[in-house]
Amino acid sequence: MKANIGGIDRTVRIVAGLALIAWVLFANGPVWAWIGVVPLATGLINFCPAYGLLGISTCKTKN
């Protein structure tokens, strides 16, 4: 798996994932908020399967 998530994208995914999971755990959020596991996992492993399928990469390219 080649990394396809850049720095800002990675940070946003991790923060959003943690926020959704915290919402469920601490504020009785809706069950669908468990979807926060997906952006958290993709942010932590630095790879998004959907980006791979679509040929998208937010990583900086080396010249």
Image: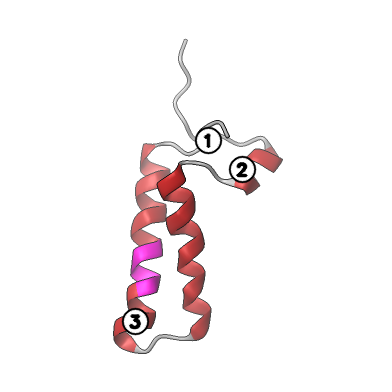
**In the rendered structure, which amino acid carries the disc numbered 3?**
Leu
Foreground disc of the pair 3, 2 = 3
Q: Is residue 1 left or right of residue 26?
A: right
- Marks 3/2: CA distance? 29 Å
Of the 4 image quadrants, the one containing the N terminus is top right
Height in image: 36 above or below 6? below
Question: At 40% from the left edge and 85% from the top edge, which residue is drawn?
Answer: 29
Colouring scheme applied when the structure was drawn: secondary structure
Residue bearing the label numbered 1 = 4
Q: Which residues are magenta?
A: 17-21
Q: Is residue 44 magenta?
A: no
Residue bearing the label numbered 2 = 51
Instruction: Return the x and y of residue 62 as percentages of the image width and height.
Output: 45, 15
Residue lying furthest bottom: 28
> Dot 1: within a 10 Å radius of its alpha carbon, few (fewer than 14), some, or many (20 or more) residues?
many
Question: At 29% from the left edge and 83% from the top edge, which residue is drawn?
Answer: 26
Describe the element under mark 1 as helix, strand or loop: loop
Mark 3 and mark 2 lie on one chain; the one further toward the N terminus is 3
Instruction: Return the x and y of residue 16 as percentages of the image width and height.
Output: 38, 62
Residue bearing the label numbered 3 = 25
Q: Is residue 54 left or right of residue 36?
A: right
Height in image: 37 above or below 1? below
Height in image: 28 above or below 23? below
**In the rendered structure, which amino acid carries the disc numbered 2?**
Tyr
Describe the element under mark 2 as helix, strand or loop: helix
- Marks 1/2: CA distance? 7 Å
